[in-house]
Image: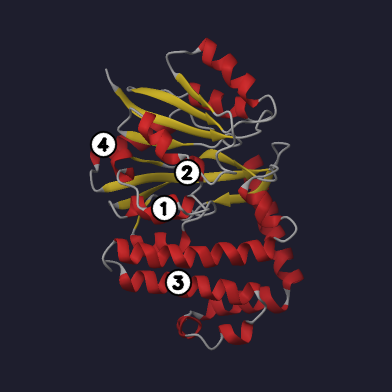
Amino acid sequence: MSILVSIVCITYNHEDFIADAIDSFLMQQTNFKFEIIIHDDASTDRTADIIKKYEKQYPHLIKPIYQMENQYSKGVAIEPLIFERAKGKYIAVCEGDDYWTDSYKLQKQIDYLEKHPKCSLVFHSAMFINVKRQPTGTIARIAKKNKIVEMGEILTKANPNFIPTASRVYRKKSMTDLPSWFLNASIGDFPLALLIANHGYFYYIDEIMSVYRTGVKGSWSDRMYSKGAIQNAIKINKECIQILEDFNIYTKFKYKQEIENAKSERYIRILLLEEKIKDVKTTVSYKKMNVTRKIRMNVEYYCPRFYKSLGKLKQISNKWKLIK
């Protein structure tokens, strides 16, 4: 039986978390073969030592890549190297500080992909926890039922809160002949989602089957909410606009209107981050917004403390649901 799924784990200085990730891979119950490719980007802690222990115990499953120099800091794209090594028809993703919580997660996602060739990616909801393994109250859940997600929604909402990284399983063939705009991007999740979406629709399973860990030093969430986060967020949104423009050309303007809508959303985010809500209100996108969204945006801008308190109440409610 050949390998059907390649589990891909990119890790760096995750000595406190990497065992959780690997254990969650090993607990998967499947009727197909899978491999585990772990890319350690020259960690300076004990991450590589922990991986080597698992490699010794499961040599037929775990196939690590140990870098001697940190590739991310050199601007080297890691994905092409991993895709070249991967033997599976499908790629399942989980970074070294996250982990899966359902032993049938892979089986559920592959079952759908095998039966629906027009689907390019299957994802699911995820629970957010902190470094102490405590639920933050945030749950990445886009709907209260399973649903098909089309390009328009992917273009505007593809981020870890919408499509958790550790929830993604997609077809490897989506990642052949990678364009330069993808390889040169400093952010990974958004352009990756666009490339895959160009090959078919996404499917969402309304089950919490993975954990997204926040507050990890050097992680995406740590950079977003640390000092200088506003300028960093502005920079990321500007890069996303450039990626959208490149993707528009790449797809020969197939999704021109959807991309224009997505760019407008990014411009609004930038204006709000720059505290220019008056400029936001002059945009066509704002005028087309429904009343509920306008109210939410204005409350968040003019009454941030009240808005945050509402968010905390929601988190407390989510925590209570998880405890029950």
| Residue bearing mark 1 | 182
| Residue bearing mark 2 | 77
Task: Tell me which numbered mark, 2 or 3, is placed earlier along the sequence.
Answer: 2
Residues packed near mark 1 inside 10 Å, few (<14), some (14 to 19) or many (20 plus): some
**3D distance between C-alphas at marks 4 and 2:** 29 Å
214 left or right of 169 in image: right
Task: Tell me which numbered mark, 1 or 3, is placed earlier along the sequence.
Answer: 1
Residues packed near mark 4 inside 10 Å, few (<14), some (14 to 19) or many (20 plus): few
Decide if residue 109 is in sight here.
yes
| Residue bearing mark 3 | 263
* Proximity of marks 1 and 2: CB atoms separated by less than 8 Å: yes
In the rendered image, residue 67, in percent from the top left (x then y), is placed at 55, 29
Q: Kindly indicate the quadrant of the structure image that contains residue 294.
A: bottom right
In the rendered image, residue 33, in percent from the top left (x then y), is placed at 34, 21
* Proximity of marks 4 and 2: CB atoms separated by less than 8 Å: no
Q: Kindly indicate the quadrant of the structure image that contains residue 68.
A: top right
In the displayed structure, would residue 164 be above or below residue 282? above
